[in-house]
Image: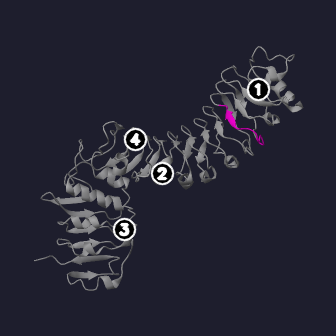
Amino acid sequence: MGDDAVYMSKLAKALTSIPSDWSPDTHFCNWSGIVCDDSSRVVNILLDSMLQGGTLPSDLNLLSKLSSIFLQNNSLSGPLPSLASLTMLQIVDLGDNNFTSIPNDCFKGLSSLRYLRLTNNNLAPWTFPIDLTQSSNLQRIELESTNMMGSLPDIFAMFPNLNSLFLSYNNLTWVLPQSLVTSVISFLWLDNQKNGLSGTIDVLSMMSLFLNNVQLQNNRFTGPIPNLSNCTNLQTLHLHDNNLTGVVPSSLTALSNLDYVSLDNNRLQGPMPAFRESVIVTLGGTNSFCQTIVAPCDPQVTTLLEIAAAFGYPILLADAWVGNNPCGNWNFIMCQDEKIIVVNLAKQNLTGTISPAFSSLTDLRMLDLSGNYLSGSILVSLTTMPQLEALDVSNNNLSRSCSQVSTMGEVKYYRECFASKFRRRRRK
């Protein structure tokens, strides 16, 4: 009890205003907001919205029996006190204050911690506390608007009970950690990062039925929306104001529990997605759906989007292929009589593979994919297209067996087994 008495005396002196019954003549276990056990050890501090300011003495961990501390919404300032080695501590809410910094090892050894909230404190720049991995019982983390920076460490497999992760309005960067796949997170809020999380959102497709509410808006995510058919309990999905590309997948529109989805201000293409009437949807802004109504795209547009899909739906093509008429001055495309006759994507830093959808462009005369980073094999279907006169796939990372191309009588020449260039003789 001696350590508890010492700390409570310090605390009373450090606060700007204290409850009227916090008298030195009264045992601290009888003070408002203080709960003790039968041994007169402090187990709960319940002072939310009851103080007007002040600081917390740094040696809070003298209260070794402390189980919960609720000090939110009190304008407390100064450094956060260390919580290290408070092995009985389960709940911490210090949000909505004016704390300025977090000491090293602040969260070390919190083996019983279930809930941590520091939301709305303008802390000195800090990174996600790896010491929390010692808190395997953690269920909820709320660290929004705390000036957190850097990347999220790939440690979420070490939180087997974590169901809510709220890190909005910080300065997180880099990509979504792969370990989120093995988590049981239902609420994932990583929106509004100052410089933006980036990369794809493919991790969502593997987080399956636990996901309920996802907020990733106002970041720099790229690539397509993944297959979300496993996310059967998903109700809310905020993806607006990113750089997502490609076609909205039917796996998203088919989710039966979905109530709200925001996709506006991305670079999405293809047909306007058709959600259930009860779903609240925002789709506008910088997206480029082929039509303004729910209707199929022009067949040539559909083919070109399938081709873009094999390249990973690069932003280059999302910005260049807008509307429902590829013969209306689309970049990299040349037409004759409203039919595509040339696709020239040379030296565009493309990755991925060559799509078999090229064979649907039956009027194509020239295809140039040279000088990219494409992998996989050269498709046989390209070598048998009826109008194709020139094909250049040189300077990629393609592979093909020579035995597969040795009997093509109409090929004028080929070099390095089609790892470079071939030209077909015009049909007479």
Farthest residue to the front: give it.
38
Which numbered disc, 4 or 2, marks the residue that appears first in the sequence?
2
Please tell me whether mark 1 or mark 3 is closer to you in this view: 1
> Considering depth in this image, is 197 or 119 the residue closer to the camera?
119
Which numbered disc, 1 or 4, marks the residue that appears first in the sequence?
1
Residue type at the position of mark 4: Leu
Q: Position of residue 333 (x, y in %)?
A: 24, 59
Q: Which residue is drawn at 45% across and 44% down?
A: 233
Q: Where is residue 410 in the image (x, y as percent from the top left)?
A: 20, 81
Q: Where is residue 38 in the image (x, y as percent from the top left)?
A: 83, 29
Bin the neighbour count of mark 1 within 10 Å (Cα to Cα): few under 14, some 14-19, many 20 and up: some
Name the quadrant containing residue 84. top right
The magenta stretch is: 84-94
User: Do callouts 2 and 1 mark residues in contact (Cβ within 8 Å)?
Assistant: no
Residue type at the position of mark 1: Val
Q: Name the residue under label 4.
A: 258
Q: Mark 1 points at which residue?
A: 35
Q: Distance between the residues labelled 1 and 3?
A: 71 Å
Q: Name the residue under label 3.
A: 371
Relative to 121, residue 165 above or below: below
User: Do callouts 1 and 3 mark residues in contact (Cβ within 8 Å)?
Assistant: no
Q: Is residue 93 magenta?
A: yes
**Visible residue check, residue 43:** yes
Q: Name the residue under label 2.
A: 208
In this figure, which colouring scheme has been used for the structure?
Answer: one colour
Q: Which residue is drawn at 41% across and 51% down?
A: 228
Please tell me whether mark 4 or mark 3 is closer to you in this view: 4
